[in-house]
Image: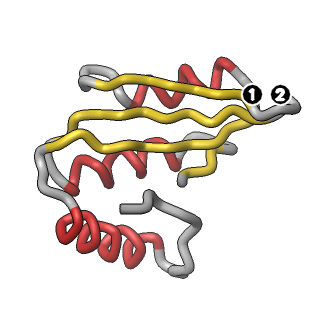
């Protein structure tokens, strides 16, 4: 499954409802789920994102763009269900200047 890309939904709740349906159709929870984010290269932003994953089992990989301006952050996390995936996305969405993929 492709991760989240910018939503065409005017209402965020409609977007998350649609996402939940897709997650439940395409995933067999509980399982490892890959979250991907793009941020400006700022270690404090990475720390903010990682706080969302406190107390969860995850692995982290990040890579800077060729010009060093942006960093892609990939977090493979064990999740129990679609609701947990959505909860994580909502928490990360509250962090300024994070693009979710």
Does residue 61 appear left or right of residue 13 in this picture?
right
Query: Residues at badges 1 and 2 in contact (C-beta under 8 Å)?
Result: yes
- Crowd band around label 2 with a 10 angstrom C-alpha radius: few (<14), some (14–19), many (20+): few
Residue 90 higher or lower than 15, as above or below: above
Residue 75: image x %, image y %? Answer: 42, 33
Q: Classify mark 2: helix, strand or loop.
A: loop
Judging by the rendered image, the residue that carries numbered circle 2 is: 68
Residue 64 higher or lower than 8, as above or below: above
Q: Measuring 56% from the left and 79% from the top, which residue is drawn there?
A: 8
Q: Earlier in the sequence, mark 1 or mark 2?
A: 1
Residue in the foreground of this view, choosing between 97 and 30:
30
Colouring chosen for the image of the structure: secondary structure
Residue 67: image x %, image y %? Answer: 88, 32
> Within the image, what quadrant is residue 95 found in?
top right
Residue 32 higher or lower than 44, as above or below: below
Residue in the foreground of this view, choosing between 65 and 38:
65
Q: Measuring 30% from the left and 34% from the top, which residue is drawn there?
A: 77
Quote the CA–CA distance across marks 1 and 2: 7 Å
Q: Classify mark 1: helix, strand or loop.
A: loop
Quadrant location, the C terminus: bottom right
> Within the image, what quadrant is residue 18 found in?
bottom left
Residue 42: image x %, image y %? Answer: 72, 24
State the mark number for residue 41: 1
Of the two numbered discs 1 and 2 in the rendering, the one whose residue sits closer to the viewer: 2
- Crowd band around label 1 with a 10 angstrom C-alpha radius: few (<14), some (14–19), many (20+): some
Residue 31: image x %, image y %? Answer: 17, 43
Does residue 47 appear left or right of residue 22 in this picture?
right
């Amino acid at each position: 499954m492709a991760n989240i890309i910018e939503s065409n939904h005017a209402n965020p709740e409609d977007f998350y409802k649609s996402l939940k349906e897709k997650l439940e159709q395409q995933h067999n929870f509980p399982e490892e789920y890959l979250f991907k984010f793009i941020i400006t290269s700022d270690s404090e932003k990475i720390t903010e994102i990682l706080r969302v994953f406190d107390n969860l089992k995850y692995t982290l990989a990040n890579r800077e763009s060729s010009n060093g301006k942006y960093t892609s952050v990939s977090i493979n996390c064990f999740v129990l269900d679609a609701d947990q995936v959505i909860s994580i996305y909502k928490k990360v969405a509250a962090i300024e200047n994070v693009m979710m993929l």
